[in-house]
Structures are given as structure tokens and as C-alpha cells.
Amino acid sequence: MRVLILVDEFFASRERSMLARLEIGLADEGVRVIHAVPDSDLNRPQVGAMGGVFRSMVPYSRRVLSVTRGLAARRIVRNLALIDDADEPDPIDVVHVFGGSVWELGRRLAGALDAGLALEVWRAGLVQRAVRGPQRSGGNRPVFLAPDTAIESALRTGGVSVRPTYWGVHASEPPREVVPPGRAPSAMFIGSGRQTKPFQSAFEGVASSFQRNGDGLIFVDALAARRAGIWKIAERLGVLNRLSLIEELESRRDLLLQGDFLIQPESAGEHKSVVLDAMSNGMLVIAAADRFISCLIDGRTANLVPVPAAASGGDAWSAMIDRLLARPADRRAIAASAHQFIRSNRLASAHIRAVLDAYMWMTASEAIPFPSETA
């Protein structure tokens, strides 16, 4: 079986680790994976490692507009033909799309390649698009892949074809101790910064708690910090010397997973494998409650701040950090519980098996071929 994985720029910049795990796992099962990635991603410094893992990649222009999708699809097909001439003659069986901005490009590719189409619904905002999309009338519908139970339930309610492919990660054994004695704590902020008030509230709360408890280090995604105006808040609170802004922090797993607290201030219904990685590695996840993220279970895998409180100043966030810093037993208990949740429910091996099962189901003899696309 051959699979073309198409990713958009936003997803590629944040989920390289998961995409690499997926390719390696599928390759172990005999699946040949080719990645279609935005041309901007080929020049990122971090992509050197990704390119070393991925066996085959074809670029496409990130400036794909509605009027140029047909052209972009034909160029990708031509690039695939060049790979075929040099290596693999077999056809593409499935086009697997990560990132809502390239769903339509994926549809055109699936039609041109006479392949099945799998669309990853990685955020809640894509559910209604899946339910209301034009693919619901006539022809073979794409299959929507759900990264967790909450998204799966929402898709099933909408009556679309859905397969559960719950995201997973490798489980460290045993998880390390967070906030060890004699070391200042550290907090890693992830998110877009578009939900400004929750982001600012969380930052104020964490910074205030760290100041009361002997200071600590705070790392924030640089783009999110700019959107949310974090620099000015840090200046007002007098914590600039404790703040580091990191470009594309979510992709820097080598740095991020060394932190003690993973802070997710926004309730955006966005699935992030870094949250699972944090749980696996013993980090303490503190997040705004989010009904679309079923792995966030208050008191079991994370400490959750109710949505109204998350955006109403830093008190709720500060109290949460204060409690955890003061109670080592509570820290150990929830870190162990989250780690066990990963081992029982969210291993990378289970994710890979689920994706492979979805591919096999899509390409079964009774499946209806996706209609060809010539535009």
C-alpha cells in the first residue's frame, strides 16, 4: 500500500514528531508513505531532522488559492510520477490530509490519483465543515478521522463517515520527577495567543505564583506572545528576566518536555500531540477546560481551570500553581495518573494500528472508488 500524506503549513510546523512516528510505524507494517509538504517547510531549520526521517517528500506552494488548486494538484501528481520512475511504480491508495486549509487540495489529489481520501479532523472548528461540506451529495464521501472520542462523537452526530484514530505517543518509563528539590520550576505556554484574555490571565497567574514561590522560568511561543501582548505584561510584573520567547515552541519537543508545567490557556478545541507527550513525560498539564479534548480529565490527567475563570484574571491559574508547588504528593499523584492514562489509552502503537485499519477499510474491495478529478 502507498499513502500520500498532505499537510498544511500550520500543521507541519507543530506536529513533526507525530508525523514522523506515524511514518515509521506505517513503514513497519509495509506501508510506503510519501509526504506532500509546503515549500516553506523545506527551508525550516527543524526540517533537517524531519527530512532525514521521511523517506520521500514532494513540495507544493503554500500560496495555493482556490483558482490554483487544480494546478497545484497536477504538479504534485507530476512530482509523484518522477518518484515512480526512480523508485515505486505502484499507485497511491490513500490521500491522508492534515490541516483544514488543504482539504480541497486533498480532494483534488484523491480524484486525480483515483485514491481514497482521509481527512483528519484535528480541531473542533472542522466538524461543521465536515458535516456541511459538498462531499455529502453524490459520489464517494471522504472518510473523516477522529483524534479522540469527543471529535468522533461530534462527527457521528453529523452523520458523516468517521473512523476513530486516537492520537498516541511513546510512554517514557518511568516518568521523571517534576519540580525536583533545589531547582526553580519552569512553565511552558502553548497556544495561538488569539484568545487574548485567557492567555494574559494564565501568564499573570503563573508569573505571580512563581514570584511568591521563589521565582521560576517561563517559556512562551513567540507568535502567541506577540498576539497576546505578553511582553508588556511581563514588563509590568517585573519578570522579563524570567521570560523566554521561543519560535514555534510546540515543535521544540527537546526543550519543551524539560519543563515542569505545560500551560494551555485557550479553550479552542485543538488537539495537540505535545499535550500527550507532556503527560507521558511526567509534566503537569494545567489547561482551560475544553469539551472537545477528551484527554483533559480534571484531577486524573490534568488540572483544569473552568472557562469563565480562565479568562477573568490570573487568580484561578495562580491558585492552581500555588497548590501544586506546595504539595509534592499531589504533583506525583497526578503525574503518575496521567502517565498511566497514556499507557492505557494513548500509545503511538495503537494510533498507528487504528490509522492502518482505516486505510484497509477504505481500500477494501467493497469500497466505492473516489470519482476522478480533472480540474
Image: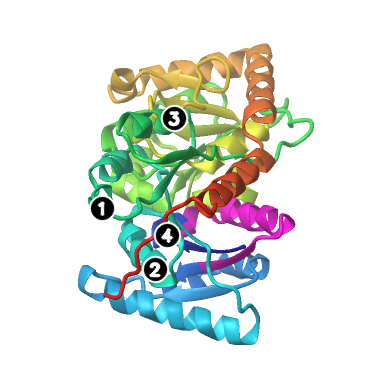
Q: Name the residue under label 3.
A: 293
Q: Are marks 1 and 3 in contact (CB under 8 Å)?
A: no
Rounded to the nearest whole Å, what is the CA distance between mark 1 and mark 3? 32 Å
Classify the position of the N terminus by image quarter.
bottom right
* Disc sitting over residue 369 in the figure: 4
Residue 336 percent location from the top left of the image: 69, 21
Residue 233 percent location from the top left of the image: 33, 38
Residue 60 percent location from the top left of the image: 41, 75
- Whether residue 172 is visible to the viewer of this picture, yes or no, is yes
Along the viewing direction, whichever of 264 and 245 lies nearer the viewer: 264
Q: What element carries label 2?
A: helix
Q: Are marks 4 and 1 in contact (CB under 8 Å)?
A: no
Mark found first going from the N terminus, 4 or 1: 1
Q: What element carries label 4?
A: loop
Q: In this view, does 197 lie above or below 220?
A: above
Left or right of 323, for residue 104 = left
In reply to whether residue 269 is colored magenta, the answer given is no
Give, as a single range, the part of the protein colored magenta: 12-35
Mark found first going from the N terminus, 2 or 3: 2
Name the amino acid type tagged 1.
Answer: Gly
Q: Mark 1 points at which residue?
A: 138
Along the viewing direction, whichever of 111 and 5 lies nearer the viewer: 111
Mark found first going from the N terminus, 1 or 2: 2
Rounded to the nearest whole Å, what is the CA distance between mark 3 and mark 4? 33 Å
